[in-house]
Image (tube, rainbow, N blue to C red):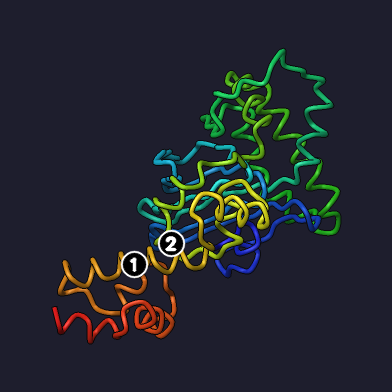
Amino acid sequence: MITIPQRLLEDDLVRVLLSDGQSHLLQKSMRVAVTDRKAYLALPVLNLVRSGRQVIRDYDGRTWYLEAGEVAFLPRGLYTLNDLLPDSGAYESLLFFMAPKTIHAFLNQIDWRPKAVDPEAPRFFKAKLNAPLRLFYEQLPTLARAMQGESGAYLQLKIQEVLHLLNQHEQGAAFRQALLHMDLNPKRNLPQFMQNHFHHAFTLEDYAALTGRSLSTFRRDFKRYFQVSPHHWLRQERMGKARQLLLEQEELRIYETAHAVGYENVSHFIKAFKQVYGQTPGEWRTQQ
């Protein structure tokens, strides 16, 4: 599973403008469209689309659209599929990845205490740039490059500044509620999630994180629900799905079938299939 921002920090298309090792300001630019890019957010992020468009889909079936000139707050723990779409030029975005303690410091500064945290409040916040935010983001790349020598300290100043500007936005109340939900780590319905997502190339650690559990709790809950180990259940479900695909889609190649049921290594898929059915996928298909 691709973890963000770690993967972005190693991406040639991403420029690190400011960083203190825990929080980061990144500039992403690309001229070729990218679709269905999977990403797991390890930190809350403020994402401004400067040019192009972005489509964000999560695994609960929700879809959000970001146009140029819109900024969004996404919580930690969100697993998404992203489409990055240049419009007659480049796709470009500026991303503030913020350590949770930085957000807590801001909430303490404004001394805002809601009467109650609304559990139904949207975790996803989006707003169009107003005049102060537009000026802030226009100047930000130039100022960040000029302050490389004080990267960490200056980054914290700019994070606090943009948080205050969003707090004063006409949608400030919704923004504050979103900050309270900076961690999207609900304890999901385990049987339902596994039935819907067994075919993805996730590790057990990935499944644990995505269902809001530690690895040990995930193993324990899984055994209680399914009466078998996660490894055994995943293999059986994936092989059953593979057999269905091989039977119903004759044009599908073996490596395509492997990828469709969560196996990135084709030889591992063939070995697992033979362990379950006593034949390789190719042998099994020819006898049907």
Q: Measuring from the top left, give residue 73's x and y in whole percent.
A: 59, 37
Q: Measuring from the top left, give residue 231's x and y in whole percent.
A: 51, 67
Which part of the image, by quadrant, shows the C terminus? bottom left
Above or below, comparing residue 167 to residue 92 in the picture = above
Residue beneath disc 2 = 200
Q: Residue at x 81, y 55 (%)?
A: 20
**Image quarter for residue 101?**
top right
Say whether residue 85 is left or right of residue 76: left
Which part of the image, by quadrant, shows the N terminus? bottom right
- Specify few, some or many for label 1: CA neighbours under 10 Å numbering under 14, 14-19, or 20 or more: some
Compare marks 1 and 2 and give the one earlier in the sequence: 2
Say whether residue 233 is left or right of residue 19: left
163 vs 210, nearest the viewer? 210
Q: Residue at x 54, y 28 (%)?
A: 122
Q: Residues at badges 1 and 2 in contact (C-beta under 8 Å)?
A: no
Above or below, comparing residue 50 to residue 219 in the picture = above
Q: Residue at x 61, y 53 (%)?
A: 218
Q: Amino acid at mark 1?
A: Ala
- Specify few, some or many for label 2: CA neighbours under 10 Å numbering under 14, 14-19, or 20 or more: some
103 vs 264, nearest the viewer? 264
**Image quarter for residue 138?**
top right
48 vs 215, nearest the viewer? 215
Q: Which residue is the extreme one toward the top?
A: 115
Residue beneath disc 1 = 260
Q: Measuring from the top left, give residue 70's x and y in whole percent.
A: 51, 36
